[in-house]
Amino acid sequence: MKKIFFSSIFFILSFAVVEFSHAGVSMKLEGTCRATQLDRTVKTFKYFSSFNGCKNKSSAAYTTKTGDSVLTGVREFVGDKDVYTFSTGTVEDTIRLTFANSTGNTSGTMTYYDDTLGEQAPRKRTIKVTCEIRDYEYAECP
C-alpha cells in the first residue's frame, strides 16, 4: 500500500515541474486542458513553459494527460495573444494553442492537423479548449 501511495505522489508531482535535461530547461505546468475534436474524441493534455515573467519567447512542452506523448516547442507573446507552438518536425504534426494575453483565462483555441475525415476534407482544424490554468507570480523584470 505504501508503495502505491508514494508512486502516486511521485506521479502527481512529476507534472508540477518538468525538466528536459537534454535541453537543459526547467518548465512549470501552465495548464491542464480538455477539448472535443470534430470526430467527438475528447483530448486532454497539459502544457508547460519556462516563462520567467520577462521574456517574450520561452521554451514550452505539451503532453497528453497520460504522458505517453510529449512535444516540445515555444511560447510567444504575439500582440494580444499568448501562443504556444509544438511540433515533431512536420507541418502536419504542429499543434498551436492560443490564449488571450491576460491572467485568468480558462479557454482558448487549439489548431491541429487531422486526416481522419479523408483527403477531401480540410485537414487543418481549430477547436475550443477549456483549461484550468495556473497563475504564477514573478519577480520584477530587470
Image (spheres, rainbow, N blue to C red):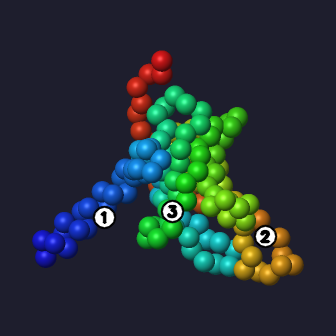
The residue carrying pointer 1 sits among few (fewer than 14), some (14 to 19) or many (20 or more) residues within 10 Å by Cα, namely few
Whole-angstrom CA distance, mark 1 to mark 2, is 35 Å
Q: Which quadrant of the figure contains the N terminus?
A: bottom left
Q: Is residue 59 left or right of residue 16?
A: right
Q: Is residue 134 left or right of residue 128?
A: left
Q: Amino acid at mark 1?
A: Phe
Query: Which numbered disc flags the more N-terminal residue, 1 or 2?
Result: 1
Q: Amino acid at mark 2?
A: Arg
Residue reaching furthest front?
22
The picture quadrant where one finds residue 119 is bottom right
Asked whether 123 or 21 is in front, the reply is: 21
Q: Secondary structure at mark 2?
A: loop
Residue topped by disc 2: 123
Residue topped by disc 1: 11
Residue topped by disc 3: 70
Query: Which numbered disc flags the more N-terminal residue, 3 or 2?
Result: 3
Q: Secondary structure at mark 1?
A: helix
Whole-angstrom CA distance, mark 1 to mark 3, is 16 Å
